[in-house]
Image (spheres, rainbow, N blue to C red):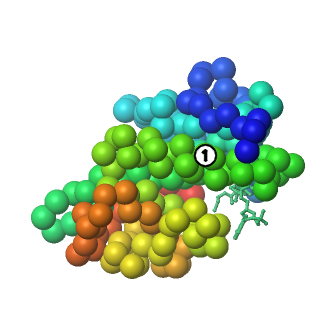
Amino acid sequence: MSGILVRTERPEDYQAIDVVNLSAFEGDDEAKLIATLREQSGYRADYSLVAEFNGRPVGHLLMTPGRCNQQKANTPVMIIAPMSIVPSQSRRGIGTALVEAARKKAREEGMAAMIAVGEPGYYERLGFEPASKWGVRCNLPVPEDAVMLVELEDGTLSGGCTVNYSAPFLSLF
Ligand SMILES: CC(C)(COP(=O)(O)OP(=O)(O)OC[C@H]1O[C@@H](n2cnc3c(N)ncnc32)[C@H](O)[C@@H]1OP(=O)(O)O)[C@@H](O)C(=O)NCCC(=O)NCCS
């Protein structure tokens, strides 16, 4: 949709990203999570996507590289979390534009899949399927059917595996 621009985070966006997350979620857990992850070594600003609508930041999506631990290999997967849109700007396709940009980036980075935990109904619209289809689980204490996945490279996940979210994610629960 016109008016939507997705770009990489810049330091001057930090406050706006906070506002987006505080408005989209109850409480400040997600805003704090983003601040914590930003301070970790290896943090990639180009994995933090800002969506502008008519020039104003109204959406945010953070990607974190992860591994799906299999018996023979550790397959690289991109974790999508959190994602937030300012409520007054929802249903304009901004979330969809963020996920599409994330998918492109994850592909470029050689990720085998993208994984997200959330409303299955929303992620299904975007081409995700239950991760259980591939025998993929994660270490978060969430219902199995909330774990959604989109394959970027056919067949690499066969045999099943577990995606381990890092400690800052676990501390949300
Ligand atoms: C969920 C969220 C990211 C969607 O962003 P968005 O910019 O409104 O998404 P889009 O405009 O791309 O898509 C909107 C469509 O998704 C649908 N949708 C939104 N949430 C949904 C859900 N939980 N289940 C099914 N469909 C959902 C809407 O009904 C809308 O469809 P419609 O226009 O045909 O009615 C946003 O509402 C949000 O930030 N929510 C609070 C934070 C959150 O839950 N983030 C994690 C996502 S699980």
Q: Is residue 169 left or right of residue 92?
A: left
- Residue 160 in the image, given as x and y percentages of width and height: 28, 74
User: As displayed, is residue 142 above or below residue 17?
Assistant: below
For this orientation, the residue located farthest to the top is 12
Name the residue nearer the viewer: 11 or 148: 148
Quadrant of res 59: top right
For this orientation, the residue located farthest to the left is 72
* Kind of residue at disc 1: Leu
User: As displayed, is residue 21 above or below residue 67?
Assistant: above
User: As displayed, is residue 128 above or below residue 29?
Assistant: below
Name the residue nearer the viewer: 39 or 103: 103
Q: Quadrant of ligand 1?
A: bottom right
Image point 59% across, 31% down: which residue?
A: 7
- Residue 37 in the image, given as x and y percentages of width and height: 49, 39
Specify whether tag 1 is near ligand 1 (CB below 8 Å).
Answer: yes
- Report whether residue 24 is seen: yes
Name the residue nearer the viewer: 105 or 86: 105
